[in-house]
Image (cartoon, rainbow, N blue to C red):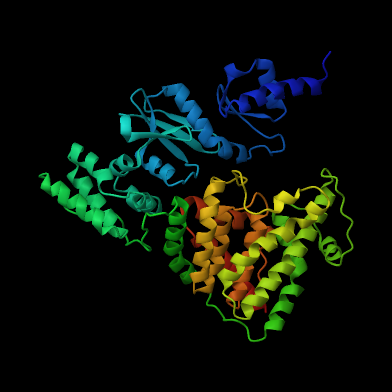
Amino acid sequence: MAKPAEKLAESLEILHKLQKSGAIAIRSANLTRTHRERLIKNGFLQEVIKGWYVPSRPDETTGESTTWYASYWGFCASYLKYRFRNDWCLSPEQSISIHVENWTVPKQLLVRSSAAQNNTTALPHETSLVDVRATVPKGKDIEVKEGLKVFSLSSALIESSPRYFINASTDVRAALSKIRDASEVLERLLEGGHSIIAGRLAGAFRNIGRDRIAEDIVETMRTAGYDVRESDPFEHTAPVFLTGRDISTYVGRIQLMWQEMRDQVMEIFPESPGIPDKKEEYLKSVEDIYVTDAYHSLSIEGYRVSPELIERVRSGQWNPDSNSEDMESRDTLAARGYWQASKAVITSVDKILKGSNPGNTVDKDHSTWYREMFAPSVTVGILGPADLAGYRNDRVFIRKSMHVPPSSEAVRDAMPAFFELLQNEQEPSVRVVLGHWVFVYVHPYMDGNGRMGRFLMNTMLASGGFPWTVIPVEERDEYMSSLEFASVHNDIKPFAKFLAKLVSSRQKSD
């Protein structure tokens, strides 16, 4: 008689075959009842809606959203294909977000189909799918991205509502920057006789500095006999003009967000005291707060550390165990890695206090911080030397977050653009807030992004003469939710206020 472990192994093998074939959404018909119930009981399968499941991890706590957010787009692609065959398409507004690589999980996904019943399907974690009976674009007006049927970029811009240009201005501007020539939209505008839409798009292109396209649209439509009146659909002029040439979507998005958010940060954050005259005293203050900083930063990431362990590791009295199952050894290795990384960070701070450009310094040095952070785990064999190579080579998902970081390919475009913004930014408070947020928004590494982001934040604080500031583990929820709000809703104000409160408190205590 087969043992329970052998039975589970048999069910896992069937699940593995389904996943290997590319299945993310798994129907009841794909598994026997016995295998399905066994996998659910052991935490390897989660129900999404009746008769539909996604693979999950047994170590996730009950009610956690990570599995759902990581599976969301793949599930929707499979479910919609099964339900509507080829007769479906995401809304033009959602199509624009997909075109500009904004994979944030929406609260409500709007889907068009001529077979739709105008129903709402409740999905996990307060998300939903709304199917609307409407025509679906055909031919060159429809594309498939990651299994999702979307409007082509030009047709999505034409079909999107005027309100969307205000509510999602960053996405729309990034989408407009991808249009290379007026002809990409003119054919559809002329065929549909869209004189009002033509005026809106002309105004939108002029808003982002693409005057040539704006003029071509207006003149061509008028030549064809249409009365076109140009109107700007945005509330404000674009904070930065995107050329659209040799620029990745993520680079454009980061540039736009940086310029849109910087004024908000400066209104909220306290004024910079300036580089301190007594540089040695500043560095000594950083060393004095190290144990507190390490305890809270590591605790935020879920490591079980104590001030005594951190002090012992710092003094070299540590005995790491290469057994990857030993959680105490992992905590000790993380503490040792944090100490080694912090020494590299202090070296960078010293350079900045002596006049080096903050952004340029961190650009050159952050890879050293990362290597030092994980070097102890390589030494004992938990990680391989290749794990210190640099930016990630795979997709990553942030635990419990609706924000989906860019692909590994996009990271290599986004990070140089990020550091260029950091190098050129003259306002220390902007370097502090947006430096931390954009770093974790891109999530360039497979692990350690939070710790790296807090190191970067404090290095930028030093560049403005602000005191080294600890984010308390007791305020983790507010910290994480404000980061999430900025990533999902494009609103930096809660995060700026959160950091400003901590920094002001530190200034008063010094």
Indicate the quadrant where residue 360 lies.
Answer: bottom right
Instruction: Find the residue positioned furthest to the left.
Output: 225
Q: Is residue 196 left or right of residue 80?
A: left
Residue 270 location, x and y as percent? 53, 74
Residue that appears at 51% across and 53% down: 487
Q: Is residue 146 above or below residue 289?
A: above
Quadrant for residue 466, please give it: bottom right
State the image coordinates of residue 495 (x, y, percent, origin top left): 54, 61
- The answer to whether residue 59 is left or right of residue 2 is left
In this figure, what is the number of numbered marks?
0
Outermost residue to the top? 1
Q: Residue 473: image x %, image y %? A: 69, 58
Quarter of the image containing the N terminus? top right
Q: What residue is rendered at 50% in x and 65% in y?
A: 420
Position of residue 309 measured from the top left corner of the image (x, y, whole percent) = 84, 60
Q: Quadrant of residue 191?
A: top left
Q: Is residue 259 something one can see in this rendering?
A: yes
| Residue 247 versus residue 428 in the image, above or below | above
Q: Nearer the viewer, residue 198 or 113?
A: 198
Screen quadrant of the C terminus:
bottom right
Residue under the point 49% across and 70% down: 424
Q: Is residue 472 visible?
A: no
From the viewer's perspective, tell me whether residue 339 is left or right of residue 211.
right
Q: Is residue 51 left or right of residue 322?
A: left
